[in-house]
Image (cartoon, grey):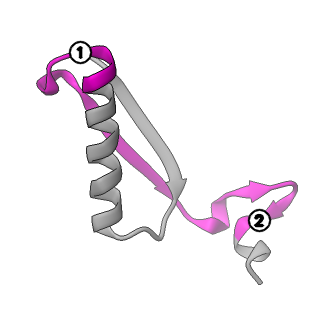
Amino acid sequence: MPLVEIHMLEGRTDTQKKALLDGVTEAIRDSLGVPLTSIRVWIQEFSPKDFMVAGELYVDRKK
């Protein structure tokens, strides 16, 4: 059973997230040949206040 967890900053639309989940699911099915019912894909979102790049909070980088 393939398990895929995607970590990303919050802010994408539900439509974008659904497209991502669909695309990853299809890629797993096509590349591994496993049954669709065995594939698990989920998104973990986090706030730009909780993510740091090169010592700077991501939320501060956009200012």
Left or right: residue 37 compared with residue 8 = left
2 relative to 24, above or below: above
Amino acid marked by disc 1:
Gly
**Along the viewing direction, whichever of 57 and 25 lies nearer the viewer:** 25
Left or right: residue 23 compared with residue 47 = left
The image quadrant of residue 23 is top left
Provide the secondary structure element on which disc 2 rests: strand
Q: Position of residue 36 (x, y in %)?
A: 15, 27
Query: Can you tell which of label 2 and label 1 is closer to the viewer?
Result: 1
Which label was assigned to residue 33? Answer: 1
- The extreme front residue here reads 30
Residue at the (26%, 35%) spot, across then down: 26
Residue at the (18%, 21%) spot, across then down: 38
Residue 53 is one of the magenta-drawn residues: yes
Provide the secondary structure element on which disc 1 rests: loop
The image quadrant of residue 41 is top left
The quarter of the picture where the C terminus appears is: bottom right
Write the start and end of the magenta stretch as one range: 29-58
Amino acid marked by disc 2:
Leu
39 relative to 10, above or below: above
- The extreme right residue here reads 55
**Along the viewing direction, whichever of 50 and 21 lies nearer the viewer:** 21
Residue at the (34%, 25%) spot, across then down: 3
Left or right: residue 57 compared with residue 4 = right
The image quadrant of residue 1 is top left
Other residues around mark 1 within 10 Å, as few (<14) / some (14–19) / many (≥20) = few
**Pointer 2: what residue?**
57
Of callouts 2 and 1, the N-terminal one: 1
Kindly report the distance in space between the C-alpha atoms of the residues bearing marks 2 and 1. 40 Å
